[in-house]
Image (tube, rainbow, N blue to C red):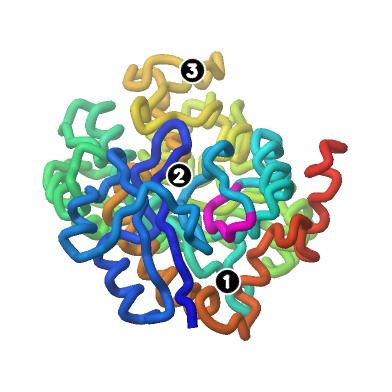
């Protein structure tokens, strides 16, 4: 029986991304676990793992992947490189009708490509199986701490993308000095847990939301809040999470008390556009608005946090927000709020983020991809097949035809 030929793509998106779906060690593990697979690594000078790290483990490099059945990347594939009649796995950013990727979806259909999108790889409980969320939280918290040190001139840390791996930038955390600051984290998923890892690494104790609001401490503390802490029903009924997810417009913000006691805010929540904003631009003008550093890991432009007026970049991660003018200003001026809103945070820790991602693929996705898809994992995440949109994504038809 012929083996399934799988190609690991070099990343072609601009700006470049140094992550890879399958790092060297995970590639070896993949071949051991799935003997029906042959693996070919497309060489890359930008990847966080060198070509030599692959060949040292006996893995095969190949510029030409036309002989492969399945092609695996991370970000959107450069359209001229798309090969017809293949199966691709990558984050396509097409299923939410992202206009900038309409041509990509159209070309995928034209070239008869089976497109499997990581974002929609879920188990039978609709829980995502692979994501970079933990690393978004880790790097987001790390960058927020950098911003705090620079804002107050108390310490200076090396950027995460200048560190070789997690061990090196965790060593940098020894420099952090937060005094009696209070740090707020919103969200309860992988992203928030990643941010908590960083704060726990530097020994900042976690306190309850109630104590965070009511008590003062002689050392730095943090708290983590979920929707039931910062939202309330308009009809005064008891908060119900499932009801909130289905009817967020029936809720109003209860976030404002946290703005009066927090020094740094790390936003790691999921936000629905139908949900209320956490606080307003006018709220930020109040003399008792205490937050001086906002690390918006969620990075919803024109979303729940008014100071997130744009996404920042790995190259230039910080900007200032003047609450009175509501304009961008110097990031570290005393009168401004320092904002970190990088929208591609895992790209700053490409080696470690790739390891976690590769392990998740091998454990939860590849058994269905290279074997029988008995639980429908691959089927649910397949956007296009045989030149058509699949039933789960047929709602994109007008979008693909350029009609909306």
CA–CA distance in space, label 2 to label 3? 18 Å
Q: Say which residue appears at 53% left-offset and 60% top-offset.
A: 226
* Of the two numbered discs 3 and 1 in the rendering, the one whose residue sits closer to the viewer: 1
Q: Main secondary structure of the magenta part?
A: loop
Residue range in magenta is 85-92
Q: Are marks 3 and 1 in contact (CB under 8 Å)?
A: no
Which residue position is annotated with label 3? 328
Say which element carries label 3: strand
In reply to whether residue 168 is colored magenta, the answer given is no
Number of numbered labels in the structure image:
3
Q: Say which residue appears at 16% left-offset and 32% top-offset.
A: 156
Mark number, residue 297: 2
Can residue 182 be seen in this snapshot? no
Foreground of the two, 19 or 256: 19
Q: Using residue 160 as the reference point, say whether residue 399 is left or right of it.
A: right
Of label 3 and label 1, which has the lower sequence position? 1
Q: The C terminus appears in which quarter of the rendering?
A: top right
Foreground of the two, 333 or 385: 385
Which residue position is annotated with label 1? 127
Residue count near mark 3 (Cα–Cα under 10 Å), binned few <14, some 14–19, many ≥20: some
- Give the quarter of the image for residue 47: top left
Q: Say which residue appears at 67% left-offset and 50% top-offset.
A: 272
CA–CA distance in space, label 3 to label 1? 37 Å
Can residue 160 be seen in this snapshot? yes
User: How far across and how far down the image is residue 51, in percent?
Assistant: 24, 50
Of label 1 and label 2, which has the lower sequence position? 1
């Amino acid at each position: 029986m012929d083996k399934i030929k799988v190609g690991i793509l070099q990343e072609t998106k601009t700006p470049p991304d140094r992550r890879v779906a399958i790092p060297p060690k995970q590639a070896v593990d993949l071949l051991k676990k799935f003997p029906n697979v042959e693996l070919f690594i497309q060489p890359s000078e930008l990847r966080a793992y060198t070509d030599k790290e692959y060949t040292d483990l006996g893995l095969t490099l190949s510029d030409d992947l036309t002989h492969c059945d399945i092609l695996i990347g991370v970000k959107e594939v450069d359209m001229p490189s798309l090969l017809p009649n293949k199966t691709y796995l990558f984050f396509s950013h097409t299923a939410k009708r992202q206009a900038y990727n309409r041509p990509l979806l159209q070309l995928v259909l034209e070239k008869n490509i089976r497109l499997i999108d990581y974002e929609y790889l879920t188990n039978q409980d609709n829980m995502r199986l692979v994501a970079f969320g933990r690393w978004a939280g880790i790097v987001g918290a790390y960058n927020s701490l950098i911003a705090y040190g620079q804002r107050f001139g108390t310490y200076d840390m090396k950027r995460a993308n200048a560190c070789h791996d997690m061990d090196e930038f965790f060593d940098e955390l020894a420099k952090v000095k937060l005094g009696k600051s209070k740090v707020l984290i919103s969200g309860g998923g992988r992203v928030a847990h990643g941010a908590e890892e960083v704060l726990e690494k530097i020994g900042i104790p976690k306190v309850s939301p109630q104590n965070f609001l009511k008590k003062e401490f002689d050392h730095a503390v943090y708290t983590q809040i979920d929707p039931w802490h910062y939202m309330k029903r308009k009809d005064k009924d008891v908060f119900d999470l499932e009801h909130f997810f289905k009817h967020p417009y029936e809720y109003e913000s209860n976030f404002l008390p946290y703005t009066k006691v927090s020094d740094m805010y790390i936003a790691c929540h999921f936000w629905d556009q139908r949900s209320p904003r956490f606080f307003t631009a006018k709220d930020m003008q109040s003399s008792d608005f205490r937050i001086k550093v906002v690390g918006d890991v969620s990075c919803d432009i024109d979303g729940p946090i008014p100071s997130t007026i744009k996404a920042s970049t790995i190259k230039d991660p910080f900007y200032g927000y003047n609450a009175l003018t509501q304009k961008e200003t110097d990031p570290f001026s005393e009168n401004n709020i320092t904002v970190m809103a990088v929208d591609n945070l895992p790209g700053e820790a490409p080696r470690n983020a790739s390891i976690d991602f590769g392990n998740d693929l091998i454990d939860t996705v590849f058994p269905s991809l290279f074997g029988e898809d008995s639980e429908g994992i691959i089927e649910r995440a397949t956007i296009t097949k045989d030149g058509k949109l699949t039933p789960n994504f047929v709602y994109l038809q007008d979008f693909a035809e350029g009609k909306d």
